[in-house]
Amino acid sequence: MRVTIDRSRCSGHGRCYTLAPDVFDCDDDGYSLVKSETVPPEFEAQARIGEQNCPEQAITLVDDA
């Protein structure tokens, strides 16, 4: 699975990195960052939770399957 964040849509709510800290982080201004574009299988559930809870729909997940 790969994950990206559309930085132009992110408003810095922080839900993704609060709910999925192994996948997402934040910059100094509170906007989301992806820790690694490729999500290890053990963190895929967290990535989905982060995506589903983004009010701006700034997170995109792509299954590599």
Image (cartoon, rainbow, N blue to C red):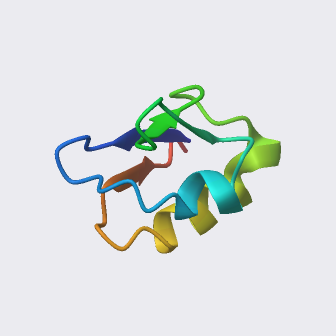
Q: Nearer the viewer, residue 64 or 58?
A: 58
Measured from the top left, where is residue 16 in percent x and y? Answer: 55, 58
Q: Is residue 65 left or right of residue 42?
A: left
Q: Quadrant of the C terminus?
A: top right
Measured from the top left, where is residue 23 in percent x and y? Answer: 65, 41
Answer above or below: position of 49 versus 24: below
Give the residue furthest to the right. Answer: 42
Q: Residue at x 25, y 40 (%)?
A: 7
The quadrant where residue 5 appears: top left
Q: Nearer the viewer, residue 46 or 27?
A: 27
Answer above or below: position of 35 versus 43: above
Q: Residue at x 21, y 53 (%)?
A: 9
Give the residue furthest to the front. Answer: 29
Q: Quadrant of the N terminus?
A: top right
Measured from the top left, where is residue 42 in percent x and y? Answer: 82, 45
Query: Total marks drawn?
Result: 0
Answer above or below: position of 48 versus 47: below
The quadrant where residue 4 appears: top left
Measured from the top left, where is residue 44 in percent x and y? Answer: 69, 51
Q: Residue at x 75, y 47 (%)?
A: 43
